[in-house]
Image (spheres, grey):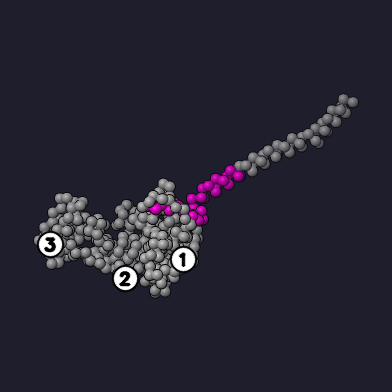
Amino acid sequence: MKKFLLYFFAFIFICFILPAILTKSNKIQTNADIEEKQDNTDKIEDSSKKYDYKQYGTIKLLHAKTGEIEEVALDSYLCNVVSAEMPADFEEEALKAQAVVARTYTIYKIENKKHENADICDDSTCCQAWVSKETRFARWEEAKRESNWAKIEKCVNETKGKIITYQNKPINAFFHSNSGGTTELPVNVWGGGENLPYLQVVETAGEEGYTQYSSEVVLSKEDLINKLKTKYEDININFENEDDIKILEHTDSGRVKTIKFGNHELSGVETRTLLGLKSTNFEVQKQDGNIKFTVKGYGHGVGMSQTGADTMAKQGKNYEEIIKHFYSGVEITNM
């Protein structure tokens, strides 16, 4: 009888109790696995957020003069930027290139955050130019206001979501008004040890027909001394000595790298700033007792030339071809 009861309880334990214990144990293990997978998924999503450009449907725009921060739709913001940065009578493919460049520049600025509570500002010396639609309309001829704005909106919309990338990251999409025939390396403008591989010296033919291509600055000897004295109080120039005002070195693009003014040697960039020249691509000569600076181009010369883009568009190039001419080895991708 005892053996019978022992076998009976053993049978019950093996058939009913033990499976229940094992099932419960397996359920706990499975739940733990699920929770761990969910944690890993969350971590993967977090790590990819930095490159999820779709999150920028709206941006925070800092109005530099008032300090006000306004939340605006990205493409709406870009219409204001393009209208401020490029003439509306430029070719559509040039305007499209400007829209993609401006969108890329915006994303780059956001990713490399400069403003504490805003994504970008409307100060062109800090970020890129921006004007309200009302201000832009006031500066256009009344008959062209609606058609100009519609043209810009079309170019922004037809390039919607497009940005310029190098090795899958948005580039620092510098641009300027007129290259004077050749673009410049960033290291020759802002210094630093290395150039960005996508910003190389490229030739831009056909810019001569634009008003931004050439300019002159004529200064009296006294005016020249006074401008240089704002930084160099001990400046001393012997105007009778031909070598006292002399360009010493050019960059690979033909711009002035260093120039001698009497007892000081200045960089081309510094000279441009102090004397109010439109670019560092200049020649200098004495003329009728004055000092004449003959300047080619307008702006720092890095990245896309806007008049160069318009020239290429007139030659039948599309916006992608224009962008890839000015930015080496890049891709145009969707956000």
Task: Kindly identify the residue that appears in the image at 25 percent across and 57 percent down.
Answer: 273
Q: Which residue lies furthest to the left in this view?
A: 240
Say if mark 2 contacts mark 3, CB within 8 Å: no
Which-is-in-front pick, marks 2 and 1? 1
Residue at 37%, 71% (x, y): give it: 311
**Which amino acid lies under the numbered mark 3 shown in the image of this protein?**
Glu
Q: Residue shown at 34%/54% (left/top)?
A: 194
Is label 2 in a helix, a strand or a loop? Answer: loop
Q: Mark 3 points at which residue?
A: 242
Distance between mark 2 and mark 1 Cα atoms? 25 Å
- Which residue occupies the extreme top position in the image? 2
- Closer to the chain start, of discs 2 and 3, is 2
Picture coordinates of residue 15 (x, y %)? 81, 36
User: Which residue matches tag 2?
Assistant: 210
Apparent side of residue 183 relative to residue 225 in the rendered image (left or right): right
Cα distance between the residues tagged 1 and 3: 54 Å
Q: Where is residue 153 in the image (x, y as percent from the top left)?
A: 46, 65
Single out the mark in the foreground, 1 or 3: 1
Structural crowding at the residue carrying mark 1, measured as other residues with C-alpha within 10 Å and reported as few (<14), some (14–19) or many (≥20): many
Label disc, if present, on residue 153 of the rendered structure: 1
Of callouts 1 and 3, the N-terminal one: 1
Please provide percent x and percent y for residue 287: 14, 67
- Magenta span includes 43: yes
Amino acid at dot 1: Glu
How far separated are the C-alphas under marks 2 and 3? 33 Å
Give residue 29's quadrant in the image: top right
Which sits in the foreground, 184 or 126?
Answer: 126
Q: Are marks 2 and 1 in contact (CB under 8 Å)?
A: no
Circles 1 and 3, Cβ within 8 Å, touching? The answer is no
- How many marks do you count on the picture? 3
Give the vertical position of 320 relative to 274 (above or below): below
Q: Quadrant of residue 11?
A: top right
